[in-house]
Amino acid sequence: MIVTLQNAAIVKSQLKAVFWFQDGHIALHLAVRRCQTEVVKTLISQGCFVDFQDRHGNTPLHVACKDGNVPIVMALCEASCNLDVTNKVNGMQVLNCFV
């Protein structure tokens, strides 16, 4: 399922049950990977857990930092995401991904 503004309402209804995708991602991870800033903001505003870690330990902020997506990094930081999370693959902290 591709997360778009058109189906954000469907995703919103699934958030309480943690909407899982391939590789342990939730809707927020996929919106971040697809650089869908408005969808990210919508998911955050609807209470999506911003610090969820996929099976590799990456949070949505890890993904946004790796991609260099400043608007999404800003949106996640404004949502008070945890900046100290390390992933399971190489123990990399979020902000190290951005450098």
Image: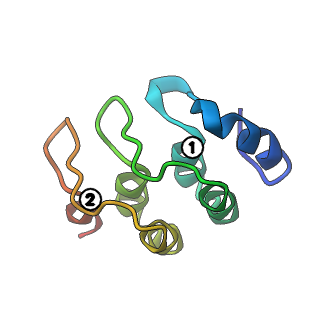
**Residue in view at x 52 percent, y 24 percent:** 22
Task: Give left or right: position of 39 versus 26.
Answer: right
- Residue at the farthest left position: 91
Q: Is residue 55 above or below residue 13?
A: above
Q: Is residue 29 above or below residue 55?
A: below
The quarter of the displayed image where residue 18 is located: top right
Q: Position of residue 90 (x, y in %)?
A: 14, 41
| Of callouts 2 and 1, the N-terminal one | 1
Disc 2 residue type (three-letter) = Val
**Residue in view at x 34 percent, y 54 percent:** 62
The tally of labels here is 2
Task: Give left or right: position of 84 versus 18.
Answer: left
Q: Are the residues tagged 2 and 1 within 8 Å (C-beta)? A: no
Q: Quadrant of the N terminus?
A: top right
Graded by Cα atoms within 10 Å as few (under 14), some (14 to 19) or many (20 or more), the crowding at tag 1 reads many
Disc 1 residue type (three-letter) = Leu
Graded by Cα atoms within 10 Å as few (under 14), some (14 to 19) or many (20 or more), the crowding at tag 2 reads many
Task: Give left or right: position of 37 versus 71.
Answer: right
The quarter of the displayed image where residue 27 is located: top right
Q: Quadrant of the C terminus?
A: bottom left
| Snapshot colouring | rainbow
Which disc number belongs to residue 70? none
- The answer to which of 39 and 43 lies nearer the viewer is 43
Residue at label 1?
30
User: SS class of the residue under badge 1?
Assistant: helix
Residue at label 2?
94
